[in-house]
Image (spheres, rainbow, N blue to C red):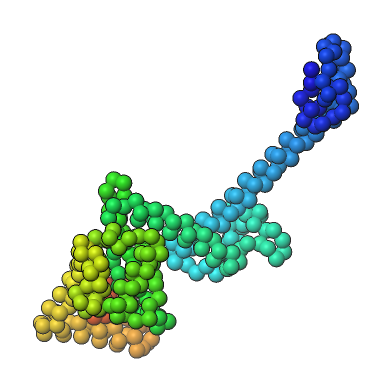
Amino acid sequence: MYCSLCVEKKKDNIFFQGTNNFRTSTLMRHETSADHKLAIQETSEAAQAKQAFCRALEGKDGAIMSAMKSVYWLVQEGIAIRKFGSLIELLRHLDCPNLSYLDQGDNAKYNSDTAGWDMVAAIAATVEEDLLQKMKSSPFLTILADESTDITVTKKLVICVRLLDDNFVPSTHFVADINVTDGKGATVAAAIKDHLKSKEIPLSKIYGFGSDGAASMTSMGNGVAGRLLAENPAMVHIHCIAHRLALCTSQAANAIDYMKDYQSTITSIFYYFKASSVRVNRITAIQELLDEPILKCNEVHEVRWLPYYKAIETIYRTYGS
């Protein structure tokens, strides 16, 4: 006969080694013995320590989850990561639970910009991995690509993908923002193929390619479409409908003097107020007097169609002033 507690805690007595004395008095003496009481105490302390450790882990997990949700919110709202620290401090003031676990010392509070960017990288890796699995599971893929120059005068290639889920419901996702040396067909085609290869996506799985109408994209010879079709003849190239419609309307408008004058008037209104804060203050005062919305005139761009709507809407809503 053995005592499980004494065996577990390795207490050197007859119930650790095993005894064939089954008398009740023997059991009662062992129950009140120092070894057995110490074994019970150690078991209780171990259980309490385990509970405390589990609570600490739960608190740390909760703190990390709260911090990562905060970072994710900043990214979703387009707010700079440098605001991560102040957001965490705000949550502390609002008594958000578990955030105290982020403090690991005077120099390790995990609410800095660096910690925020590390969390962004972790979230991005998870999102990218999930998207990659969806791309590999989809029977077919189509890609939409466009190159442009960003505010730092760096040539960029943006790639989006359209895929099918298990229920054959299509969805469109942003895939990559790649630096390229130029916008030539060979460069863009190579960048697309290299990215697909790095993700282990065969070009034969791409059944559609969408782009703007630039020759470097649409040319069946040295353009991106031609180079991709040479390796995957089953692929269909489509000139972006939205882009084509915008070109169609803008070019049609240029052939009508009335529309040209209207565009010129909208542009003149924008620069008239842009050049003078006094004029802006005067129009604002008139808008308030007429109980109109306080709106500023928008600039229009020939290559962008959305600003046209905003500019016309502003004039329509504040026409009285």
> Can you give x and y, in whole percent of width and height, for residue 263 in the image?
20, 82
Between residue 293 and residue 63, name the one nearer to us: 63
Residue 54 seen: yes
Give the quarter of the image for residue 271. Answer: bottom left
Q: Quadrant of the C terminus?
A: bottom left
Apparent side of residue 232 relative to residue 50 in the rendered image (left or right): left
Between residue 289 and residue 90, name the one nearer to us: 90
Between residue 189 and residue 177, name the one nearer to us: 189
> Can you give x and y, in whole percent of width and height, for residue 49 in the image?
74, 40
Looking at the picture, does residue 113 appear above or below residue 148? above
Give the quarter of the image for residue 228. Answer: bottom left
Residue at (39% x, 70% y) in the render:
177
> Can you give x and y, in whole percent of width and height, for residue 100 in the image?
66, 54
Apparent side of residue 134 relative to residue 7 in the rendered image (left or right): left
Q: Quadrant of the N terminus?
A: top right
Residue at (44% x, 63% y) in the render:
77
Residue 210 seen: no
Between residue 246 and residue 35, name the one nearer to us: 35
> Which residue ends up furthest to the front in the rendered image?
231
> Which residue ends up furthest to the top in the rendered image?
23
Residue at (31% x, 80% y) in the render:
183
Looking at the picture, does residue 250 appear above or below residue 111? below
Apparent side of residue 299 relative to residue 131 in the rendered image (left or right): left
Residue at (72% x, 61% y) in the render:
105
Number of numbered callouts drawn: 0
> Which residue ends up furthest to the left in the rendered image?
256
Looking at the picture, does residue 66 appear above or below residue 43? below
> Can you give x and y, in whole percent of width and height, for residue 308 in the image?
24, 75
